[in-house]
Image: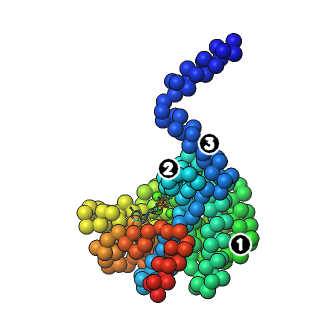
């Protein structure tokens, strides 16, 4: 009987698609990676209209001890599916605040530290408490922490989202909407959201000079941000032509390979020292 079961199991694994097996393997490795502290943060500068670094965005990478670095696109969706994004996101938040505090202690001026928050994290009942406790433990100034949210997560349960955002604002943190323009938030809601910044999705920036509609969407978002009293940042700026267009239309902040790729903290320090 045992043999039969074993055969059945064997048959089942044989029948499993290559893709499913890889998924299972990845799931196990991801769980181990969390225990084994195999994650690192890279930081990408946010550039002000004056050309100075106004802050940076923390972007997580998985660096297995015995393999090449894995970009977040390959494990964040799985971590979300498995609920592992809550502990992983908690680590990201703590690590970003820790690094931000180190830079302040080294004499750097206060700058924004932007951290990506996923829907599962934002909707978790302990989220506001986690942010409060992390700020307190790290000694990082709340006014320097910017939490990047997405339209889709905010629109899932709008009233509850507004309550959570207000609680985060009460802690003194800043809020931005990431990938703006790709979701479904309406102007009426946008007006009610206590946010500080819109981050224009890089897909629109990519179309500057190529797709007339992308340029029009960008100028509309910039005008809308201004009307609502929000800061506006363009993501994925890769060319001087894109920057010129954005500048001409009143964009205040930029982020992209044109200025700097995401880098580990020590490399970013070198980049910054060379610029000044
Ligand atoms: P995102 O939040 O929209 O982050 C911007 C992504 O664009 C980053 O990819 C960044 O490396 C890339 N990028 C920056 N400048 C340019 C550019 O000029 N051109 C192009 N083509 N790309 C540029 P990355 O680091 O691979 O991250 C991908 C996504 O993974 C992020 O998109 C974000 O949604 C997610 N992610 C990254 N770190 C975290 C995290 O700690 N927590 C959560 N929940 N999500 C994260
Ligand atoms: Ca982001
Ligand atoms: Ca984005
Ligand atoms: Ca994105």
Taking the spot 66% from the left edge, 60% from the top edge, the residue there is 91
Mark 1 within 8 Å of ligand 1, using the beta carbon: no
Quick check: 216 left or right of 271? left
Q: Which residue is mark 2?
A: 74
Q: Is residue 164 left or right of residue 19?
A: right
**The residue tagged with tag 2: helix, strand or loop?**
helix
Instruction: Estimate the spatial distance between the alpha carbons at disc 3 and disc 2, rounded to whole Å.
Output: 14 Å
Residue displayed at 66% across by 71% down: 98
Which label sits in the foreground, 1 or 3? 3
157 lies above or below 276: above
Determine which quarter of the picture holds residue 126. Answer: bottom right
Task: Please name whichever residue, 205 or 139, is drawn nearer the observer in this view of the structure.
Answer: 139
Indicate whether 26 appears above or below 162. Answer: above
Percent x, y for residue 194?
A: 58, 69
Residue neighbourhood size for the residue with mark 1, other residues' Cα within 10 Å, grouped as few (<14), some (14–19), many (≥20): some
Of the numbered discs 3 and 2, the one sitting upstream in the chain is: 3
Mark 2 neighbour density, 10 Å: few (under 14) some (14–19) many (20 or more): few
- Whether residue 217 can be seen here: no
Display coloring: rainbow
Q: Is residue 186 left or right of residue 265?
A: left
Which image quadrant for residue 102?
A: bottom right
Please name whichever residue, 83 or 262, is drawn nearer the observer in this view of the structure.
262
Q: Which quadrant of the structure image shows residue 8?
A: top right
Q: Residues within 10 Å of mark 3 (few under 14, many from 20)?
A: few
Query: Mark 1 or mark 3, which has the lower sequence index?
Result: 3
Give the residue pinned by disc 3.
28
Say whether residue 87 is visible: yes
Quadrant showing the N terminus: top right
The residue wearing badge 1 is: 138
């Amino acid at each position: 009987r045992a043999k039969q079961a074993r055969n059945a199991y064997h048959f089942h694994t044989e029948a499993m698609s290559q893709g499913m097996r890889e998924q299972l393997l990845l799931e196990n490795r991801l769980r181990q990676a969390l225990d084994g502290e195999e994650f690192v943060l890279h930081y990408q500068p946010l550039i002000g209209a004056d050309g100075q670094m106004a802050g940076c965005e923390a972007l997580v990478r998985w660096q297995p001890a015995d393999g090449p670095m894995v970009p977040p696109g390959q494990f964040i969706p799985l971590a979300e599916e498995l609920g592992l994004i809550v502990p992983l996101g908690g680590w990201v938040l703590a690590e970003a605040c820790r690094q931000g505090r180190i830079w302040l202690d080294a004499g750097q001026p206060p700058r924004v530290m932007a951290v990506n928050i996923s829907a599962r994290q934002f909707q978790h009942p302990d989220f506001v408490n986690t942010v409060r406790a992390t700020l307190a433990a790290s000694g990082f100034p709340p006014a320097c922490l910017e939490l990047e949210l997405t339209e889709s997560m905010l629109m899932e349960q709008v009233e509850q989202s507004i309550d959570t955002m207000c609680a985060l604002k009460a802690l003194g943190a800043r809020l931005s909407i990431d990938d703006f323009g790709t979701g479904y938030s309406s102007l009426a809601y946008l007006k009610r959201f206590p946010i500080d910044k819109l981050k224009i999705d890089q897909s629109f920036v990519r179309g500057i000079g190529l797709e007339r509609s992308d340029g029009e969407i960008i100028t509309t978002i910039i005008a809308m941000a201004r009307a609502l009293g929000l800061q506006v940042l363009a993501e994925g700026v890769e060319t001087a032509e894109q920057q010129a267009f954005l500048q001409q239309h009143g964009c205040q902040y930029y982020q992209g390979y044109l200025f700097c790729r995401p880098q580990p903290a020590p490399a970013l320090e070198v980049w910054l020292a060379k610029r000044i």
